[in-house]
Amino acid sequence: MSHVLVLGGGPDRERQVSVNSSQAIADALQRAGHAVRYELIDRITGAELARLPGEVVFPALHGAFGEGGPLQDLMERDGRPYVGSRPGPARIAMDKVASKLAAAAMGIPTADACVVNRNDADVPIPVPLVMKPVHDGSSVGLHLCNDLEAYRRARIEVDQDIDLHPGRAYMAERMISGRELTQPLVVDERGALEAMSIIEITPSEGAYDYDAKYIRNDTRYDIEPQLPGRVSLDVREWSLALAHGLGVRHVCRVDFLLERGTDRAWLLEINTMPGFTDHSLVPKAAASRGVEMPALCDRLVRAALRDHGRVGAMVGG
């Protein structure tokens, strides 16, 4: 088996989710028989990464630094195999506007959206709309604006957040009401992305926000729900097409909304390092196909080694 360096934490707003994911991954890899070095990091440097032992890196970080390209740049220079997408695909997938533009170019339906200009008081697209950060996940900073008054209140919070974090960008997106679906993709033994079970997410109340994802235990998850028309086929085909088109590898999760009263699904986003907590959807979907957490994490490590040309490498000192 391999000596795996599992990284968790990071400097982004999803740090606690990353801590929970990385701990679960480290435990699963140990149960799968791997030697594991577990490290909680902040904004690590290349020199600091090089000093950490391990022949393959599993970076379970969520957010712009750990998932959106900077850490991937460091791992590329480090030279060891690592789980997850390479820097270019990671950057595009983390940028919700860029990934929506790429999807639209592929013919994948996605709602109208634009970047919010804080110097413009006008509503960029008609309400109801959704405002959210361009480069964050886990529904961090999500604002549902059903009317102009809600939009004005949200803009005050958004402007305050940008004041505290210069450079942070927000987007406005046409609100689509309906059923939330997610399509996890996991590498198979041949190295191709495989569609796991579609999961429908139904919060007990309100939106599928951070609390519904990671804090409360009343969100319902329905595996392979009954969907109208060819929605299941569309979601699978579009997810694979988007992942292949962007160059995503090993694992991702693609989120959609099925518009109420229709048989049309709309792309929300793609996540290249989805959560691995006990609430998370990729482990749930894989388990429904008979791939439990130790086997799932082992599969990802083996894929990283295979892609690096080091299949069968044994533990180093």
Image: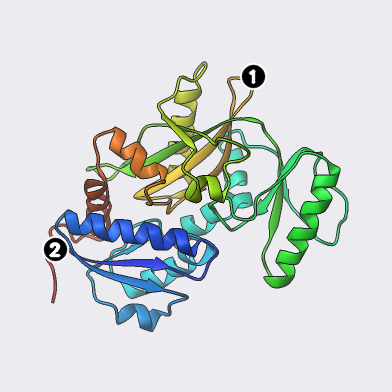
Which part of the image, by quadrant, shows the N terminus? Answer: bottom left
Colouring rule applied to residues: rainbow
* Residue ranking furthest to the top: 229
Q: Residue at x 60, y 51 (%)?
A: 96
Q: Earlier in the sequence, mark 1 or mark 2?
A: 1
Which part of the image, by quadrant, shows the C terminus? Answer: bottom left
Which of 203 and 288 lies nearest the eye of the viewer?
Answer: 203
Residue 291 shown left or right of residue 15 in the figure: left
* 1 vs 2, front mark: 1
**Callout 2 secondary element:** loop
**Where is mark 2, residue-wise?**
313
Q: Residue at x 57, y 37 (%)?
A: 267
- The label shown at residue 275 is none
Where does the image place residue 142, in percent across and percent down from the top left? 65, 50
Question: Which residue type carries mark 2?
Answer: Ala
Where does the image place residue 72, in percent across and percent down from the top left? 42, 66
- Whether residues under marks 1 and 2 lie with C-beta atoms below 8 angstroms apart, the answer is no
**Where is mark 1, residue-wise?**
261
Measured Cα–Cα span from mark 1 to mark 2: 53 Å
Which of 67 and 38 lies nearest the eye of the viewer?
Answer: 38
Res 206 quadrant in image? top right
Where does the image place residue 286, in percent across and percent down from the top left? 31, 39
**Callout 1 secondary element:** loop
